Each structure stands twice: as structure tokens, then as C-alpha cells.
Image (cartoon, grey):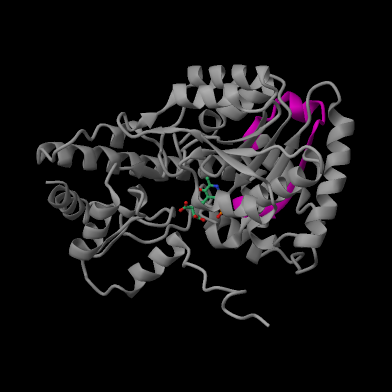
């Protein structure tokens, strides 16, 4: 039944394919700048010290069992997740016009939100598109097409300034059909590392308000970008203060290092006027969707995150761990930029320190990326994105010289 013309061989996932190729490479100088996962200066994944503490507490808790969680997940986890992303004093929380479900990390939250929008925001007669930044996280497109949510792109990255194409983005928002859905990276844009300034966010919000556009925030790097949880949630909180009805996908993969435990949350915030009642009804429909998709979410990662989020001492230690990760990445940004400038590698490299978060959009083209892999065993995505956490004091000289070689 499943012949090749019905089920053709799918291409390998670019990111996970890269990960496999890196692991298969035996060269002792190989450098992994692919997957967006934090590594310490020892090039090893980092289990946050605060996560180790939480695991210890869980191990000694005699009441822990393996029963199902509620469909919406661990209540202490979702309520703490609301506070960490919106701020404990958020009007959305005070007025109870928010509903939240624990999801399969950020991917699950983006998916659940997109599924909900195709069923309740779009109708058979009126299908709104979701606007994705150009470029965006590779998986966004597949997630949207899987739920039949039409996608369009808005200009985002300017190749010549290697910064934000602000005018291009604004005009796309001005021209988008009213009520279109706009997917926004809350902070540390993937893959470019380019974020709007606060002033630019205000202008974006103004146009989106005028056009009655629907914000869908994807927040996968809160606290990881600047090192400050509140700073990195500024755009989301501003939009809520402006009275938007919106969705948020919240991932704890990077900022808790819980990649494989799949800890995340989906939040729907209703507009101020019809708040609590709408949020309640939306929550009830989200639960139906979740039940049929995953029934209920995985407990372990949520229990770890919930322990930390709900304990002031552990929370403070988590904030210190965030500063360690974001600090090391910023050190690598400055080191890489200065090494390329010292070698007078052709081109300007200031964008490496101006961009923020996990990634740097180097501007290297596909050919140069391929040469870096062939000649120097450097692994990065072909769009020129590098995961800065893959750099460390031992391989940064090697990498800078490898870049210099392919650029000259
Ligand atoms: C913007 C964004 N949103 C969501 C996710 C999903 O993360 P989750 O593990 O489902 O919570 C990722 C992961 N990005 C990195 C890993 C990946 O591609 O899955 C990456 O871009 O390398 C994002 O970069």
C-alpha cells in the first residue's frame, strides 16, 4: 500500500541530520555549532546545579508516583510558568484572563496553539494566515502545515546590515489582511539573534493594534538571552499591557537545560474586556485537543521546573545559573569578534556582539559553510547560523582561523 510514489523518502531533518553527522565525525578538531543546546567551556551539556538539587529533592520525596497528570498538566508548574513569563503582578493573572496547559516543551506549545487557531480562529469561510519571520526556526513551517494553518512570511533579517529589516517588517504588518496571525520570537530570535529594540517593539505593537493582528509569541530563550528573565519577557508583557489577546509558547528546554524532558507551557491570554469567561471556555477546548493529541503531559521535567519556580531560594539559584550560561555565550561573542578583527578577516564582524541569545547569524554562505565542514570539520546550519554555545576557549581560535580561511 505504501509505495514510493505514495510515501517518498523524506529529506533528513537539517538540524538532527547535522547532529548525527557531527557524532559520526572522528576528527579530533571537530566543532559542533549546530543544535541550539548549551554546552559549557568543556564542550559538554550542562546539567544546571539547581536542576541537580531539584532532582535530589524529588528522589527523596516518598509521595512521588507515576500516576497521570491532569490533561492541562501539573497545576503548580503552569501557575508558576504564568508568573515567570508575565510577571507575578500581571493584569492577565490578576483578572484571571489567562488559561495555561503544560505541553511537550516549546514545540508542543506552538503546535497546540496552531491547532487551536485552525479550529477556532479560522472558519471554513475565513482562513487567516500565520505570518512567520524570514528566516525563522526551521520547524515552524512544518508545524503549521501539519495543522493546515496557511503560512506567509514577513521580512525580518537585513543581509546587508545583518540586523533587523524594520521597515520591511512594519510594511508587511501594515499590508497584512486584518486579523492575520503574527508569529513573534519573544527574545533571542532564531536563527538570526536579532531582536527589535523596545522602541521598535512599541511601533510593531501600534501597527498590529491598528490592523487587529493576532500575536503568537514563541518564547524559547527567556533568561537565556540577556541573563535577565524580566528583560527577556519585556515584549510579551508590553503587548499584554497594550490589551492584546494573544498566545504564548513557552519552552524550558534551554533555560533549564531540560531539552529531552520536554517541559513547556502554552498560554492563551484573553482581551481585557471579556477576559476570565473567554479564557475559561478556550481552556476547555484546549483540553479536548490536548487529550486527543497526548492525553496528558510528561511529569518529570515539569516537577523539576515546578520545584525551582516555586521555591525562592532555588529560583535565585536558577537566575544565577542563567547568568552563567548567558555570560559565557557573551564572552564567546566578544572573543570571536575580536579574533576575526585581529586577523583582519574580510568583512565586518560587529554583528556577532550585537546579536543576542543562542545563535549568531554569521552571514557565511552555503558554499563557505560546506567548506568549513569539509576542510575544518565545523558543523553549522547551511544558512550560516552558529550556536555560540558550541564555542569554548579551546576551539575558538581554531574556528576563527577556519572562518578566515573560507572568507579570504
Ligand atoms: C524559536 C524556537 N521555538 C521552539 C523551539 C522548540 O524547542 P523545544 O525543545 O520543543 O522546547 C526552538 C528550538 N530550537 C532549537 C532546537 C530545535 O531545533 O528543536 C534549535 O533551533 O536548534 C526554538 O528555537
Q: Is residue 226 left or right of residue 351?
A: right
**Closest to the observer: 213 or 45?**
213
Comparing 29 with 205, the one in front is 205
* Residue plotted at (60% across, 18% down): 207
Comparing 140 with 172, the one in front is 172
Q: Position of residue 238 (x, y in %)?
A: 61, 22
In which quarter of the view is residue 19 placed? bottom left
Q: What's the residue at 64%, 48% (across, down)?
A: 110
**Which residue: 18% across, 36% down?**
347
Residue 77 seen by the camera? no
Q: Is residue 104 magenta?
A: yes
Q: Is residue 363 magenta?
A: no
Based on the displayed image, in which of its 4 quarters is residue 158 positioned? Answer: top left
Instruction: Where is residue 389? Give x, y as percent.
Output: 36, 50
Tell me, yes or no, if residue 303 can be seen here.
yes
Residue situated furthest front in the rendering: 5
Left-right relation of 302 to 252: right
Q: Which quarter of the image is occupied by the N terminus?
A: bottom right
Magenta-tinted stretch: 84-107
The answer to whether residue 73 is above or below residue 11 is above
Residue shown at 85% from the left, 54% from the top: 288
Q: Nearer the viewer, residue 199 or 300?
A: 199
Q: Is residue 82 above or below residue 386?
A: above
Query: In the image, residue 275 lies at what x, y percent?
Result: 84, 27
| Residue 259 position (above or below residue 117) | below
Please state the horizontal and vertical placement of residue 142, each as a whole percent of the image.
58, 55
Give the image quarter of residue 99.
top right
Amino acid at each position: 500500500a505504501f509505495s514510493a510514489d505514495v510515501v517518498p523518502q523524506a529529506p533528513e531533518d537539517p538540524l538532527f541530520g547535522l547532529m548525527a553527522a557531527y557524532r559520526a565525525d572522528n576528527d579530533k578538531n571537530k566543532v559542533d555549532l549546530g543544535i541550539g543546546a548549551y554546552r559549557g567551556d568543556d564542550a559538554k551539556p550542562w546539567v544546571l546545579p539547581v536542576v541537580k538539587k531539584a532532582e535530589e529533592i524529588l528522589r527523596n520525596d516518598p509521595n512521588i508516583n507515576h500516576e497521570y497528570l491532569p490533561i492541562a498538566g501539573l497545576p503548580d508548574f503552569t501557575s508558576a510558568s504564568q508568573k515567570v513569563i508575565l510577571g507575578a503582578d500581571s493584569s492577565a493573572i490578576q483578572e484571571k484572563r489567562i488559561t495555561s496547559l503544560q505541553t511537550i516543551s516549546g514545540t508542543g506549545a506552538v503546535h497546540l496553539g496552531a491547532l487551536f487557531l485552525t479550529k477556532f480562529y479560522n472558519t471554513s469561510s475565513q482562513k487567516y494566515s500565520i505570518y512567520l519571520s524570514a528566516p525563522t526556526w526551521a520547524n515552524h513551517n512544518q508545524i503549521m502545515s501539519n495543522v493546515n494553518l496557511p503560512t506567509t512570511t514577513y521580512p525580518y533579517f537585513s543581509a546587508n546590515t545583518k540586523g533587523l529589516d524594520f521597515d520591511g517588517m512594519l510594511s508587511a504588518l501594515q499590508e497584512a489582511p486584518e486579523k492575520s496571525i503574527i508569529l513573534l520570537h519573544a527574545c533571542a530570535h532564531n536563527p538570526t539573534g536579532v531582536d527589535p529594540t523596545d522602541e521598535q517593539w512599541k511601533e510593531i505593537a501600534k501597527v498590529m493594534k491598528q490592523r487587529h493582528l493576532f500575536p503568537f509569541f514563541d518564547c524559547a530563550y527567556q533568561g537565556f538571552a540577556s541573563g535577565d528573565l524580566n528583560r527577556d519577557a519585556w515584549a510579551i508583557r508590553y503587548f499584554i499591557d497594550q490589551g492584546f489577546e494573544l498566545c504564548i509558547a513557552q519552552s524550558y528546554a534551554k533555560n533549564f537545560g531540560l531539552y529531552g524532558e520536554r517541559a513547556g507551557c502554552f498560554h492563551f491570554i484573553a482581551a481585557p474586556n471579556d477576559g476570565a469567561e473567554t479564557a475559561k471556555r478556550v481552556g476547555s477546548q484546549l483540553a479536548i485537543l490536548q487529550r486527543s493529541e497526548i492525553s496528558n503531559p510528561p511529569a518529570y521535567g515539569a516537577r523539576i521546573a515546578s520545584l525551582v519556580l516555586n521555591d525562592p531560594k532555588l529560583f535565585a539559584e536558577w537566575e544565577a545559573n542563567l547568568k552563567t550560561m548567558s555570560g559565557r555565550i557573551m564572552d564567546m561573542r566578544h572573543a570571536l569578534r575580536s579574533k576575526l578583527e585581529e586577523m583582519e578577516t574580510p568583512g565586518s564582524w560587529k554583528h556577532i556582539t550585537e546579536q543576542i541569545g543562542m545563535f549568531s547569524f554569521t552571514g557565511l554562505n552555503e558554499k563557505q559553510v560546506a567548506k568549513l565542514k569539509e576542510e575544518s570539520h565545523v558543523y553549522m546550519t547551511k544558512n550560516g547560523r552558529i550556536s555560540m554555545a558550541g564555542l569554548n576557549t579551546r576551539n575558538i581560535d581554531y574556528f576563527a582561523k577556519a572562518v578566515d580561511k573560507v572568507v579570504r
